[in-house]
Image (tube, rainbow, N blue to C red):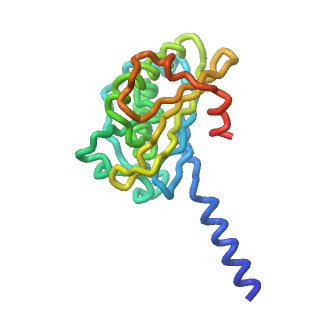
Amino acid sequence: MKKLILLLLLAVSTIASTQVVTIKHTAYEIRFDTQIKEPLYTHYVLTKQMLSNGKARTLFHCDKAILCDQQGNESDYKGSIYDRGHLSPDDDFRANPATEVESMVYTNCAPQNKYLNRGTWKALEIYTRNLANNFDVEIWTGCIYGTQKQGSLLIPTYYWKLLKYDGKYVGFMFPNITPTSKQITDYKTDANQLLKLIE
C-alpha cells in the first residue's frame, strides 16, 4: 500500500512538473503552459543578420513540438475582436524561410487587442528591430493572464517585453486594451520586476 501511495504521488508530481514545458525552435524558445494552452513567454537574441524584409508571411499552424490539442487553434480566434498576437514576431525571422515558418505557430501567440497589436505594440517591435541594427538584442516577451476567455483560451490582461542590449535592461508593460498612447515610452516599466517573471 505504501508503495502504491508513493507511486501515485510520483505520478501526480510528474504531471504537475510537465504542465510548463520549454519548446525549442531554431531561432527562439517558448515557455509554454499546456494546461492553459498558451505561452508564458518567449526568448531569443535578435541580431542584425536576422533583419530582412523576406518573403510574405505564412499561415498560422499547429506547433508539432507538442500535441495540437494542447495549444490554441483557428477556432479560438474565428469571429473574435482579438488578433493572434505574436510574442516573438514573424518579422524578426524573415531572413530565413524555415525560422519564419517556425514563428507562425499557435504556441507563439495569444489573444491580443487588435488595436494594440497593430498600433503601439507594433511600434515597439519596430523599435526593437531598429536597435538590432546596432546591438545584439536579447528579448523576452510574455503575457500575464486574466480569467476571461476567448474560445478555449484565456485573454491576457497584460503583454510585456524585456530587452537587454548594450549591457542594460529595458522593460515595457502594455494593458491588453486599445492603447491610450502612441508613445512606447509611456509603457516603460521596472525591468527588475520583469526579470522575476523569467527566473
Relative to 24, is 90 above or below?
above
Residue at 30% x, 49% y: name it: 74
Q: Residue furthest bottom?
A: 1
Can residue 150 be seen?
yes
> Residue 66: image x %, image y %?
48, 55
Q: Quadrant of residue 69?
A: bottom left
Instruction: Tell me: 51 left or right of 55.
Output: right
Q: Residue furthest top?
A: 134
Q: Quadrant of residue 6?
A: bottom right
Counting the numbered discs, the total is 0
Q: Residue furthest front?
A: 180
Q: In which quadrant is the N terminus drawn?
A: bottom right
Residue at 45% x, 46% y: name it: 107
Relative to 154, is 164 above or below?
above
Relative to 1, is 70 above or below?
above
Nearest to the observer: residue 75 or residue 186:
186
Residue at 43% x, 37% y: name it: 103
Q: Residue furthest left?
A: 79
Residue at 70% x, 78% y: name it: 7
> Residue 187: image x %, image y %?
50, 23
Q: In which quadrant is the C terminus drawn?
A: top right
Can residue 26 be seen?
no
> Residue 137: image x %, image y %?
59, 21
Instruction: Tell me: 13 left or right of 77.
Output: right
Instruction: Tell me: 7 left or right of 85.
Output: right
> Residue 157: image x %, image y %?
46, 40
